Structure formats: structure tokens, C-alpha cells
Image (spheres, helix red, strand yellow):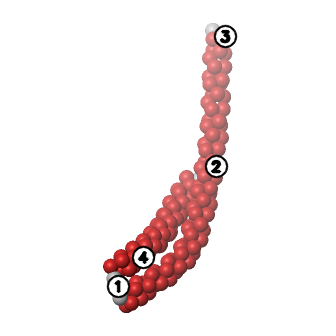
């Protein structure tokens, strides 16, 4: 029983590690989205500064193209994030099942230990009763 429990614990730790890694990948994608959104905001600030200080058409076109590329990148990243979240959910379910499997074995082990202790207590009581009975018989025979 202990060997099976050890295996289940190792499996659970492995699932936990996999879940953590996939969660980290999702966080990295989210960070890249936020970073891209921040770059777009900075680009808009830069555009406003250009408008206030004088600008060329080429500067505005370059800035507009940059914003379009960043928007496209955000769309790609959001799609990747959606796929990654699906992977994270699957890994989370896998971890949950591994945790439940381990817990089931822990409960079975505890019940087995309780049965063993009850059996041992019963044997101890029987032995003590026999000793008491023998002692009582010895006292009567004197």
C-alpha cells in the first residue's frame, strides 16, 4: 500500500510541476500582451507629441504601421493565450485527478492502519484477559 501511495505522490508532484509550467507560460503570454498594449499607448503619446511639435507624413505613417503591427501581435497573443488557458485547464484537471487518487489511497491506508490497530488491541485484550484469568486461577488454587 505504501509503495502505491509513494507512486501516486510522485505522479501528483509531476502533475503539479506540469501545471505550474503551463501556468507560467500563460502568465508570460499575458505579460507580452500587456507590454504590447503599453507600447501602443506610448505610440499614441508619441503621435500626439508629433502633432503638437510638427511632424512629417512619413513619421505618422511609420507610427500608424507600428500600431497596426502591435494590434496584430496582440490578436495573435490573445489567440495563443486562449489555447494556453485550455492547456492550463486540462493540466489543472489532471492535477485534480492525481490529487484525488492520492487522497483515496491515503484514506485506504488510514483505514487499513485503523483495522490493524483494532485487531492488535483485540489481541492485546485477549492476552491480558488470559493473563488475568491465569492469575485468578493461581490465587484460587493456593
Relative to 136, is 113 above or below?
below
Q: Point out which mark residue 140 bears.
A: 3
Q: Where residue 142 appears, x then y in whole percent?
A: 63, 9
- The residues bearing labels 4 and 2 have C-alpha atoms spaced at a distance of 63 Å
Q: Point out which mark residue 68 bears.
A: none
Label 4 sits on a secondary structure element that is helix
Q: Where residue 86 appears, x then y in whole percent?
A: 59, 71
> At x 50% / y 66%, what residue is drawn?
23
Relative to 142, is 56 above or below?
below
- The residues bearing labels 1 and 3 have C-alpha atoms spaced at a distance of 119 Å
Counting residues from the start of the chain, the first of labels 1 and 2 encountered is: 1
Counting residues from the start of the chain, the first of labels 3 and 4 encountered is: 4
> At x 66% / y 32%, what residue is drawn?
122
Q: Nearer the viewer, residue 117 or 58?
A: 58
Q: Where residue 100 appears, x then y in whole percent?
A: 62, 56
Label 3 sits on a secondary structure element that is helix
- The residues bearing labels 3 and 2 have C-alpha atoms spaced at a distance of 48 Å
Q: Nearer the viewer, residue 35 or 63?
A: 63
Relative to 85, is 127 above or below?
above
Q: Residues within 10 Å of mark 2 (few under 14, many from 20)?
A: some
Q: Point out which mark residue 55 bears.
A: 1
Q: Residues within 10 Å of mark 3 (few under 14, many from 20)?
A: few
> At x 54% / y 60%, what residue is drawn?
12
Residue 7 seen in the current view:
no
Amino acid at each position: 500500500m505504501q509503495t502505491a501511495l509513494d507512486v501516486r505522490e510522485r505522479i501528483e508532484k509531476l502533475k503539479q510541476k506540469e501545471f505550474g509550467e503551463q501556468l507560467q507560460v500563460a502568465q508570460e503570454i499575458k505579460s507580452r500582451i500587456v507590454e504590447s498594449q503599453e507600447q501602443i499607448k506610448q505610440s499614441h503619446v508619441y503621435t500626439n507629441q508629433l502633432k503638437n511639435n510638427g511632424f512629417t507624413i512619413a513619421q505618422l505613417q511609420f507610427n500608424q504601421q507600428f500600431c497596426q503591427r502591435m494590434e496584430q501581435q496582440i490578436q495573435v497573443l490573445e489567440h495563443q493565450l486562449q489555447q494556453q488557458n485550455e492547456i492550463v485547464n486540462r493540466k489543472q484537471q489532471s492535477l485534480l485527478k492525481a490529487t484525488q487518487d492520492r487522497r483515496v489511497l491515503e484514506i485506504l491506508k488510514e483505514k487499513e492502519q485503523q483495522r490493524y490497530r483494532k485487531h492488535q488491541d483485540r489481541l492485546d485484550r485477549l492476552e491480558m484477559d488470559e493473563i488475568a484469568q491465569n492469575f485468578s486461577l493461581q490465587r484460587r488454587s493456593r
